[in-house]
Image: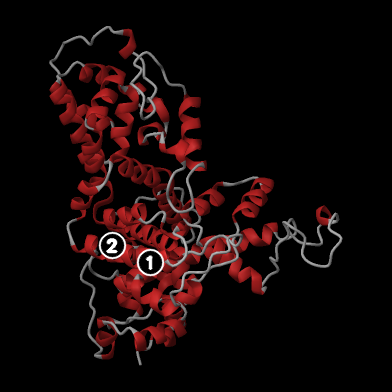
Amino acid sequence: MRKILVKLRRFTRPGKPAKSDDNQSTPAQCPKAGTPADTSASATQGDVGRAQQRLETQQQPDGRLDSQAEAAVVESTAADGTGRGEPHKAVVSCLETLPAELRRQILFAISDISGLDDMSAITCASPVFWQQYQLDRKALLEHALHTTLGIVLVDAYAVQTTALVCYTKDTARKSAVYQAIDEYKISRSGAPGLILGESSEQDLLSMANFFRSIVRPLALRYATDTLHKFDTFSEVEISLSKMEQTRILRALYRFQLYCNLFRDWPSSRQDPELEIESTEKLALLFGLFRPWEMEEIDSIYATMFRKYEEVFDAIAWDLHRDNPKFDFWGYPNTPPGARHLEEDGFFREYIRQGTAERGLSLFYNVLCINDHDDLVETMDDNMDVSGSYEDLIHTTTQFNRRVEYPQEGDLAEEDRERLPFAGDREDAPPLAWVIMWKGRYSNWYGDYIPQVFKLGGYVFWDRERLVKEAIKGPFLRAREEHQRDFIII
């Protein structure tokens, strides 16, 4: 933000004093959506903190906000509140004196350089820029989302538009799934920015809020936790390249898209399950992605798998039928509220899948919980016993998909086509994938790839990061140890 504001000083005349309007001399609270901008109100850190908390706690598992959270705009969730604008108060005051057209250009320039973040900061720091933003909100959100997400915008848009598909009743849901996937195919074939013109302003706000409150912090948390496994003594802040960010973001959005389309209703609902077989699901959605992109999704799921296993171990006794809190139940069957979380138990497998398929919002919430009682309560409220993702990426399902729904990638593998490393590009495999398969095309992923490669997140990292000794050593040792798993028959 500092660099941007320094560049923007040229819009102001040297020596021109800022207006002495008291209402503009202090950082202002971001007004809520749907209400006029109140330039006399000043924000407190508590106000911003509460706004953040509302957005994070009211996010629904399918990626949408509830009715109260929808009323809060993306600007009210600025990462560090009005304090971010304090050091630049004088500069902001000078900018506020500019004509409306120049203020508009400044907002577009900021959104073009840094996307959502700094546009949020300046609108929170200045009531004048807040009012200017209100006048051009849809256009600015479109511009900022396109700048921030790039090609991943297509996946973010699909998540937004499919958020209610899993709640479609009975047989209509199957048609809704087919239609949603057809629309997703069309979106993928065009320019990412074009789809925003079809979005309502409310959809854009929801997309921005979901990105800022769930997807982005989850992506940073994933990258930090994964990379620190290789260098546990490093305290350097993780800095991701643009391509690394793209890989992680698209994997997160695509997993959420899978949840929106295919996750089952909570077990309390009596409607029949979605009548689409795992083989067809695999072909319908995951068949749209290249095999290394599928491995990106499965690497995210591997992290969720590991985390939920740790959580189940931690809360198993709290929800066990033999826990004294269930002594009131005098019948032989399982008491209400008790769960079968025994290690390697049949029910645990399905609870793990069903809970993971509740989506990114629940997962991020679980990652942020530090209190044991809060964790027990959250999991008790959100665990589900129905899920199918692990069956979907099983080797047997992949074999069946090749027979029933053959793809071009299968033929490329049979022909032993070469797949060299072509650089860190959106349409090319990462170096780790090329090394795994020794430069040959392979259309296998999921259970076919050993867990050690997923937990290391190798398919996310650029060549520059992969060749560093801390990562290269474990990767090459794992490749040597599992070399028989990468033989193309």
Q: Quadrant of residue 326?
A: bottom right
Residue in the foreground of this view, choosing between 319 and 4: 319
* Residue pictured at 26% horizontal, 41% vertical: 115
Asked if residue 48 lies left or right of residue 284, the reply is: right
Residue 174 lies, with reference to residue 360, above or below; the image says below
* Residue pictured at 37% horizontal, 61% vertical: 254
Q: Which mark is residue 296?
A: 1
Residue in the foreground of this view, choosing between 386 and 298: 386
Query: Label 1 vs label 2: CA separation?
Result: 19 Å
Give the mark toward the camera: 1 or 2: 2
Residue 334 pos. (x, y %): 77, 64
Residue 8 lies, with reference to residue 153, above or below; the image says above
Q: Please, what is the three-letter code of the amino acid marked with disc 1?
A: Glu
Secondary structure under the numbered disc 1 in the rendered image: helix
* Residue pictured at 13% horizontal, 25% vertical: 101
Residue 280 pos. (x, y %): 39, 77
| Crowd class of label 1 (few under 14; some 14 to 19; many from 20; radius 10 Å) | many
Asked if residue 118 lies left or right of residue 309, the reply is: left
Residue 97 lies, with reference to residue 306, above or below; the image says above
For marks 1 and 2 on the same chain, the one whose residue lies earlier in the sequence: 2
Q: Please, what is the three-letter code of the amino acid marked with disc 2?
A: Tyr
Q: Which mark is residue 184?
A: 2
Residue 171 pos. (x, y %): 44, 67
Residue in the foreground of this view, choosing between 30 and 310: 30
Residue in the foreground of this view, choosing between 313 and 421: 313
